[in-house]
Amino acid sequence: ALRRAFARQCIPTSEWVRLMNYLVDHASRFLRAARMGVLWNGTTRFVLPRQFTYNSRTIKIVGPEEKSLAWVFRDLLLDDEYGLRELSKKPANVLDIGGNIGLFSLWAGVNFPEATIHVYEPNPALLESLASNVGQVGATVFAEGVSGNDGCGVFIEHGESMVGQCTVAPTGDISLVS
Protein backbone atom coordinates (compact mmCIF):
# COMPACT_ATOMS: atom_id res chain seq x y z
CA ALA A 1 0.00 0.00 0.00
CA LEU A 2 2.84 2.37 0.84
CA ARG A 3 4.53 1.68 -2.49
CA ARG A 4 1.28 2.43 -4.37
CA ALA A 5 0.91 5.69 -2.45
CA PHE A 6 4.44 6.69 -3.42
CA ALA A 7 3.85 5.59 -7.01
CA ARG A 8 0.85 7.93 -7.24
CA GLN A 9 3.18 10.73 -6.19
CA CYS A 10 5.46 9.83 -9.16
CA ILE A 11 8.47 8.96 -7.02
CA PRO A 12 11.08 7.26 -9.23
CA THR A 13 11.95 3.66 -8.38
CA SER A 14 15.54 4.64 -7.52
CA GLU A 15 14.27 7.09 -4.91
CA TRP A 16 11.91 4.47 -3.53
CA VAL A 17 14.80 1.99 -3.17
CA ARG A 18 17.01 4.64 -1.54
CA LEU A 19 14.25 5.50 0.94
CA MET A 20 13.60 1.85 1.81
CA ASN A 21 17.34 1.21 2.30
CA TYR A 22 17.55 4.23 4.59
CA LEU A 23 14.57 3.05 6.66
CA VAL A 24 15.92 -0.49 6.97
CA ASP A 25 19.40 0.76 7.93
CA HIS A 26 17.99 3.18 10.48
CA ALA A 27 15.68 0.55 12.02
CA SER A 28 18.51 -2.00 12.16
CA ARG A 29 20.82 0.48 13.87
CA PHE A 30 18.06 1.36 16.34
CA LEU A 31 17.61 -2.33 17.22
CA ARG A 32 21.36 -2.99 17.57
CA ALA A 33 21.63 0.04 19.86
CA ALA A 34 18.65 -1.09 21.94
CA ARG A 35 20.26 -4.52 22.44
CA MET A 36 23.31 -2.67 23.81
CA GLY A 37 21.17 -0.54 26.11
CA VAL A 38 21.87 2.57 24.02
CA LEU A 39 19.33 5.02 22.64
CA TRP A 40 19.77 5.55 18.90
CA ASN A 41 17.86 8.71 18.04
CA GLY A 42 19.47 9.54 14.71
CA THR A 43 22.88 10.76 13.63
CA THR A 44 22.31 14.45 14.37
CA ARG A 45 20.96 13.89 17.90
CA PHE A 46 23.06 10.89 18.92
CA VAL A 47 25.60 11.49 21.69
CA LEU A 48 28.39 9.23 22.91
CA PRO A 49 26.78 6.88 25.43
CA ARG A 50 28.36 6.59 28.87
CA GLN A 51 27.95 2.82 28.85
CA PHE A 52 26.85 -0.10 26.69
CA THR A 53 26.16 -3.79 27.26
CA TYR A 54 27.51 -6.52 25.00
CA ASN A 55 27.96 -10.25 25.61
CA SER A 56 26.44 -9.78 29.08
CA ARG A 57 29.11 -7.21 30.00
CA THR A 58 28.38 -3.61 30.86
CA ILE A 59 31.20 -1.35 29.69
CA LYS A 60 31.51 2.25 30.88
CA ILE A 61 32.81 4.95 28.53
CA VAL A 62 34.75 7.98 29.75
CA GLY A 63 35.72 10.76 27.35
CA PRO A 64 35.07 14.25 26.08
CA GLU A 65 31.64 15.27 24.75
CA GLU A 66 32.55 15.38 21.08
CA LYS A 67 30.24 14.71 18.15
CA SER A 68 33.00 12.89 16.27
CA LEU A 69 33.30 10.33 19.09
CA ALA A 70 29.56 9.64 18.89
CA TRP A 71 30.00 8.98 15.17
CA VAL A 72 32.95 6.65 15.87
CA PHE A 73 30.77 4.72 18.35
CA ARG A 74 28.08 4.47 15.66
CA ASP A 75 30.52 3.29 12.99
CA LEU A 76 32.57 0.87 15.10
CA LEU A 77 30.05 -0.61 17.51
CA LEU A 78 26.58 -0.16 16.07
CA ASP A 79 27.54 -0.72 12.42
CA ASP A 80 30.57 -3.00 13.08
CA GLU A 81 32.38 -1.12 10.32
CA TYR A 82 35.54 -3.26 10.66
CA GLY A 83 33.57 -6.52 10.62
CA LEU A 84 34.86 -7.86 13.95
CA ARG A 85 31.70 -9.91 14.54
CA GLU A 86 32.18 -11.57 11.14
CA LEU A 87 35.76 -12.78 11.61
CA SER A 88 35.93 -16.56 11.33
CA LYS A 89 39.15 -16.76 13.35
CA LYS A 90 39.58 -14.87 16.60
CA PRO A 91 42.84 -12.89 16.68
CA ALA A 92 45.35 -13.56 19.45
CA ASN A 93 46.68 -9.98 19.26
CA VAL A 94 45.08 -6.63 18.43
CA LEU A 95 46.88 -3.33 17.79
CA ASP A 96 44.98 -0.08 18.18
CA ILE A 97 47.20 2.66 16.77
CA GLY A 98 45.89 6.13 17.55
CA GLY A 99 43.53 4.72 20.17
CA ASN A 100 41.91 8.03 21.17
CA ILE A 101 39.58 7.08 24.08
CA GLY A 102 39.72 3.39 23.16
CA LEU A 103 36.41 2.67 21.42
CA PHE A 104 37.99 0.24 18.96
CA SER A 105 39.87 -1.52 21.76
CA LEU A 106 36.66 -1.82 23.79
CA TRP A 107 34.88 -3.33 20.78
CA ALA A 108 37.77 -5.72 20.11
CA GLY A 109 37.93 -6.64 23.80
CA VAL A 110 34.25 -7.57 24.11
CA ASN A 111 34.40 -9.54 20.86
CA PHE A 112 37.76 -11.23 21.57
CA PRO A 113 38.13 -11.46 25.35
CA GLU A 114 41.18 -13.76 25.08
CA ALA A 115 43.13 -11.41 22.79
CA THR A 116 46.11 -9.35 23.92
CA ILE A 117 45.31 -5.72 23.04
CA HIS A 118 47.97 -2.99 22.76
CA VAL A 119 46.80 0.61 22.38
CA TYR A 120 49.08 3.44 21.21
CA GLU A 121 47.95 7.03 21.78
CA PRO A 122 50.24 10.09 21.79
CA ASN A 123 47.66 12.68 22.97
CA PRO A 124 48.38 13.30 26.67
CA ALA A 125 44.93 14.85 27.16
CA LEU A 126 43.25 11.50 26.35
CA LEU A 127 45.42 9.10 28.33
CA GLU A 128 43.36 9.10 31.53
CA SER A 129 40.09 8.40 29.68
CA LEU A 130 41.81 5.85 27.46
CA ALA A 131 43.30 3.93 30.40
CA SER A 132 39.97 3.93 32.25
CA ASN A 133 38.09 2.65 29.21
CA VAL A 134 40.42 -0.04 27.92
CA GLY A 135 41.35 -1.26 31.39
CA GLN A 136 37.90 -2.88 31.43
CA VAL A 137 39.01 -5.28 28.67
CA GLY A 138 42.57 -5.78 29.90
CA ALA A 139 44.25 -3.74 27.16
CA THR A 140 47.72 -2.23 27.67
CA VAL A 141 48.14 1.49 26.92
CA PHE A 142 51.33 2.93 25.46
CA ALA A 143 51.59 6.74 25.68
CA GLU A 144 53.49 6.85 22.39
CA GLY A 145 52.96 7.67 18.77
CA VAL A 146 53.68 5.15 16.02
CA SER A 147 55.99 6.35 13.26
CA GLY A 148 58.26 5.07 10.51
CA ASN A 149 61.25 5.66 12.79
CA ASP A 150 61.87 5.79 16.52
CA GLY A 151 62.26 9.30 17.86
CA CYS A 152 60.40 12.20 19.42
CA GLY A 153 57.43 14.26 18.41
CA VAL A 154 54.97 16.90 19.50
CA PHE A 155 51.22 16.57 19.62
CA ILE A 156 49.25 19.27 17.82
CA GLU A 157 45.56 19.70 18.68
CA HIS A 158 43.13 20.87 16.02
CA GLY A 159 39.89 21.10 17.99
CA GLU A 160 38.17 17.77 18.59
CA SER A 161 40.39 14.89 19.64
CA MET A 162 39.84 12.93 16.41
CA VAL A 163 41.71 15.50 14.33
CA GLY A 164 44.85 15.97 16.44
CA GLN A 165 48.18 14.80 15.07
CA CYS A 166 51.63 13.88 16.27
CA THR A 167 54.48 15.38 14.28
CA VAL A 168 58.15 14.40 14.36
CA ALA A 169 60.21 16.94 16.34
CA PRO A 170 63.73 16.15 17.61
CA THR A 171 63.07 18.03 20.87
CA GLY A 172 59.49 16.87 21.29
CA ASP A 173 58.08 15.40 24.48
CA ILE A 174 56.17 12.52 22.85
CA SER A 175 57.94 9.22 22.31
CA LEU A 176 57.62 7.79 18.79
CA VAL A 177 58.12 4.07 18.14
CA SER A 178 58.38 2.18 14.88
Image (tube, rainbow, N blue to C red):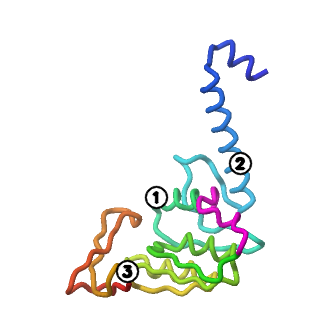
Circle 1 SS class: helix
Foreground of the two, 114 or 54: 114
**Horizontal side of residue 171 vs 24, given as left or right:** left
Numbered disc 2: secondary structure: helix
Q: Could you tell me what secondary structure mostly forms the magenta stretch?
A: loop
Give the residue type that dot 2 points to.
Ser
The three-letter code of the residue at mark 1 reads Ser
- List x then y, in percent, for residue 61: 58, 71
Horizontally, is 9 left or right of 88 in the view?
Answer: left
Task: Find residue 89 and report its image quarter.
Answer: bottom right
Residue 28 image label:
2
Query: 28 above or below 157?
Result: above
- Bounds of the magenta span? 77-89
Of residues 135 and 10, the one nearer the viewer is 10
- Quadrant where the image shows the N terminus: top right
To which residue does mark 3 refer? 145
Magenta run includes residue 87: yes
User: Mark 1 = which residue?
Assistant: 68
